[in-house]
Each structure stands twice: as C-alpha cells, then as structure tokens.
Amino acid sequence: MAAGLVLLGAEATLAEQVTLKLSNGDTLHGKLIPSESTDTTTVLLHPVLGRLNIPKTALMPEPKPKPWKLSLSAGVTGSNTDNDLSAGGTVQIDSSYTEGADKVVLKGRAQYEVSRDEGESGNTTDTNEGDGELRYIRSLNSRLNAYAAANFNYDALNTTGTDLFVSSIGIGYDLIKDKNKRLTVSIGPSIQKIWGGDGCNADPVCGQTFAASSARAELEWKTSSSSSITVTNTYTGAYVNGISTNNIFSIALKIFPLNNQRLFTSLNGQTIYSELRSPKVNNSISMQVGVKLD
C-alpha cells in the first residue's frame, strides 16, 4: 500500500474509505483501490473527481514511529461494611523498544489486597500476586520472527509453588497483520521451575527444574480510535508426570475517553491453571486508570 496514507478517523468497518492528506495541506476523500496502487502511486476513486492516480511524492509522509512505547496504570479499591474493612491496589507497566528488526518487550504487574473484620486487631492478606515478562523478538521477514522470553509469576498465598519461572526460545508467525490488528502465534522449547510455599518441602516436584514446551497466541486489536483489546494465551507443558499443564490466559480492554490517546481506563482479567501448584486455579480482575508516556 502506498506510503503517506493517513487515516483520519475512518471506521474499521469502512476500511477502504480513506482520507489522503497531500503535502500541500489539501485532503482527498474517497475509496482506495489497493489492487491498482503501487509503491509509487496511490489509486483513489473520488466521488466527484472520479479515478485519481496520486504520486507518492504528492502525499504527506507518514510520521516515523517512536522506538519507545511506555504505559503506566494503577487502581485502588476499598470498602467498609459494618466495620469490616478491606483495601487493595494494583499497578502495571507495559513498555517496548523497537529498532530495525529488533524489539524488546518488558511488562510487569502487581496486585495486593488486605482486609480486617470487626473485632480483629490485625490485617489479613487476601491477595499478593503479580507477574513479569521480558521478551526479545527478531523479525526475520514481514511475518516470521524468532524470540527469546523469560516469564515470572508469583502468588504469595499459594500452599505449593508460590513462584513460577518459564524461559523459552522459538519461532513466531503473524497470522494476521495490518494497521489495526495483529494475531501472532509462537512455539518453542522451554524450561519451567516452581518453588516456594509451606508445602514445597513435602512436594517431590516443587523446587525442581523441568524441560517443557511452550506455545503462545496473542491478539492486539485497535477496535476503534477510542478503544483497543489485547488477548493473550500462553501454554507450557512440563515433562513431569506425563505432561503437566501451566496455562495463563489474560485479556485487557482499554478505553481512551474523548479520543485522548494518552489517558485511558482499562479492565484487566487473568486466569491461571497450573497442575504443579496448589491451588491449581487463580483468577484475578482489576480496573485501572493509566497514561501512555511514549
């Protein structure tokens, strides 16, 4: 598709209806004909002027994307019912750096909640969990990439396996890749280790490192100019007791009010199923407000 195309609020359902901004400041509205457009010419079907062949040099150049992307978000909760108190908070960071064919992604999340019932003198910790990810991606062509990743998850309230570490390398492929959405799948060998918890010493698996395989699917979709959704599922099968499953599913919906592309609210959910930890299932949900700093 010809460079210099600027989409000014076109709806996703009307992807072919575009607005071209010319280098002299003028704009043209019409229907893009991608099958006839080339690297040097954009073909537009104008409702009044008809078919237009617009040279690339006449279009406003697309802005060069910034290498750094960073967003910070946080949320707090609290309640007081018949002198039963509860309070909690969550914080999250998402960052990435891209240069040429190389991309580094760093993510982190932490959630903590306490409560105190009437008559109690001390607080009870209800939630103390979080996770982090460091991922390196090397683009091999327009859709294929190689990756190396390290993931850490903790839940301090687990009886067995308060901490989980997975490291993997492999190949990824973009099944869908366009301006508004990307669906990427990846697969590769990995290692997995769990440790920590009062029951760890009595568990024959806890504290050991096992060979494993990992598979991941991630959908990043900018549904409109004011919203986006990210869905990720990561499966790791450790080669112990046959194949022991560790699966993490997460979803994040971001809303940018009044089309402000810096401030946002987000609804985040995560489900973890891990056969080698106790308890095996952990669900969490949070609502946050945040800011993009890139």
Image (spheres, rainbow, N blue to C red):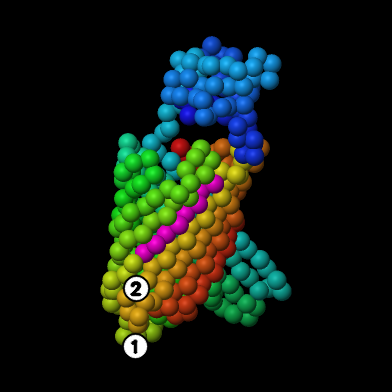
Numbered marks: total: 2
Q: Which is more toward the observer, 251 or 155?
A: 251
Q: Is residue 215 magenta?
A: yes
Secondary structure character of the magenta stretch overall: strand
| Element type at mark 1 | loop
Q: Which mark is residue 47?
A: none
Upstream in sequence: badge 1 or badge 2: 1
The residue that appears at 51% across and 48% down in the rendered structure is 220
Q: Which is more toward the observer, 37 or 207?
A: 37
Q: Residue furthest front?
A: 36
Q: Nearer the viewer, mark 1 or mark 2?
A: 2
Residue 252 can be seen in this image: yes
In the rendered view, would you say 266 is above or below 70? below
Left or right of 244: which side holds 207?
left
Q: Residue furthest right?
A: 82
Q: Which residue is tagged 1?
A: 202
Q: CA distance from mark 1 to mark 2?
A: 20 Å
Residue 259 can be seen in this image: no
Q: How far from the left and from the top, in percent, is residue 258?
A: 66, 37
Which of the 4 image quadrants contains residue 39? top left
The residue that appears at 43% across and 48% down in the rendered structure is 174
Q: How far from the left and from the top, in percent, is residue 208?
A: 28, 77
In the rendered view, would you say 224 is above or below 4? below
Q: How far from the left and from the top, in percent, is residue 284?
A: 55, 66
Say what amino acid the circle numbered 1 marks.
Answer: Ala
The segment highlighted magenta reads: 214-221
Q: Which is more toward the observer, 182 or 263?
A: 182
Q: Which residue is tagged 2?
A: 238
